[in-house]
Amino acid sequence: MNVQFDRTSEHKLEEIRLKEEEDLVKILAKRYGLASVDLKQTIVNPEALRLIQEKAARVAEVAPFEIKNKNIDIAIRTPNAPETQKALEAFRKNGYKVTPHMASHASLEHAWGYYKEISFAAKTEAGVMDISGEKVARLTESLTSIQKTRDAISEALTLEKQNRTTRIMEVLLAGALANRASDIHLEPEEGKVGARFRLHGVLANAAEIDNETYRSMLVRVKLLSGLKINILSDAQDGRFSVELQDRDIEIRTSVLPGNYGESIVMRILDPRSISKPLEELGMHPKMLKRMMSELERPNGMILNTGPTGSGKTTTLYAFMNRVKNPDIKILTIEDPVEYHLSGIVQTQVDHKNYTFASGLRSALRQDPDIIMVGEIRDREVAETAIHAALTGHLVFSTLHTNDAAGAFPRLVDLGIDPSIVGSAVNAVMAQRLLRTLDDTKKKEVPIEGEDKILIERVLAGITDRSLIPDNKEVMWVPDVPEGEPEYNGRVAVYEVIHTSREIEELVRRNPTIREIEDLAIDQGMITMHQDAVIKILNGSTTISELRRILGEPS
């Protein structure tokens, strides 16, 4: 009589066999006076595993799985086997204190499976991920929409396990580059993992990934980024690079523990996004002309304000690209160095020995003409930056304030004497990024109702009437098929306060932000709301973007 087992029965039998094998290991370990370990239930430290080549580990039937200083834990199959003893002795000769643990063959196989990740990481030369230009070109040409990226990931999920992780990583990176995403978010939920792209500042669903595949991806990302795969309860930050034919893409990785596992955010730093000349950032021609004059001054400070993700770095890099020449030295202190610029000395803080404050003091000893400080965060940095601006250096930096006028009280709050703030600061900017319309995919609509009231109120506050467009009757909205992107890129809206004698005198009297703003407007400043309305009437962006990013004007 033939007995047929279905797959469920076979699976249960396999589970019973594996459990029996693990139970036998525990019995044998006691007999030999050793500890036992199930590596399927233990985190394997790649730093330990990489101390022996895979071929040698398999021959000796060993798997180092944890290392602390010179203490190493090694899983072994048979304590008295000659090859095993030879391998353990080799570790001891290299100064390691070895603690052997007995393990099953299945357990060792599980640990050896990490070698493909370690070997991949080794090939990347400490965080450089090599992808052929031809492959990336093919993928980026085909993954021109979120839906196409979803389809490609769905296809990749059907591949064998050993190929699946690499393929999904390639698709996610290529899809993000093709669609000009700034970030990739991988977020574990109950029973699945969501993948989202941040496109022009807004998150869009890209795919769903099963938990098993995601665990492999998490290990891959950690290895690429130089993070510890056995740390699960602490946040970690790292980086790796993708080498393309025409440029290097840097990926900044953040791993954060959560309710359903560690989430990953990969920030994509594409040199093309930072290479915009100053003329293409969206400044009104009159504002641009005035800023050009500020950049020609030999000393003083230019501050840029706004929240994270508002484009401050792009603007400051455009300033530096504009002013750099062989006759001057430009030095930066950044956290981190986001893009590498030729002809400029760029340094990165480490928050321990090289902070913004210590870095700025060291920078002044390097005899620079222009200094860029990534952010003024405390009194020490503020005082040193102000001193540099007053002693013959042109200083670029950022502050976290909501608007340009708020920068002056913020410096005073940090401990700067109000009597010297106006003397040191040449100009303060604030900026935000609004999504832009595609000229081929927009339609004209009349300005009516609440929109008309808002626009008229904002235009009424512009003192320089020559800035107002002739068109005040129509605006534009996206006109695209359902499911396609409504916007194409982003443009900055700005406001700039130039420190006049009147502004300098007002700052000495400890004014409110509104008082500073009112005086700046009287002297011709256009606000971010006004700049946005001008761009709406010119067809660059929409009133819904103004409301989403800037809110209703006060």
Image (cartoon, grey):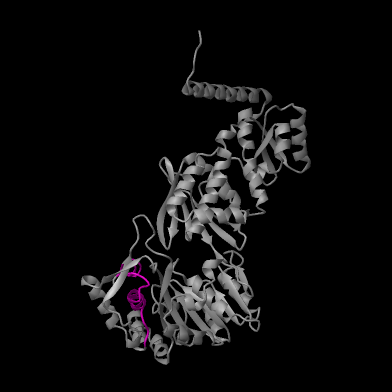
In the current view of this chain or complex, which residue is farthest to the bottom? 501
Residue, x 60% and y 80% (percent of image)?
A: 324
* Residue 13 visible at all: yes
In the current view of this chain or complex, which residue is farthest to the top? 1
Which picture quadrant has residue 367? Answer: bottom right
Residue, x 75% and y 27% (percent of image)?
A: 81
Q: Which residues are magenta?
A: 524-551
Say left or right for 457 vs 531: left
- Residue 543 x, y percent position in the rendering: 31, 70
Q: Main secondary structure of the magenta part?
A: helix
Which picture quadrant has residue 523? Answer: bottom left
Residue, x 52% and y 50% (percent of image)?
A: 171
Magenta stretch: residue 110 in it? no
Residue, x 77% and y 36% (percent of image)?
A: 89
Q: Nearer the viewer, residue 325 or 469?
A: 469
In the current view of this chain or complex, which residue is farthest to the front? 440
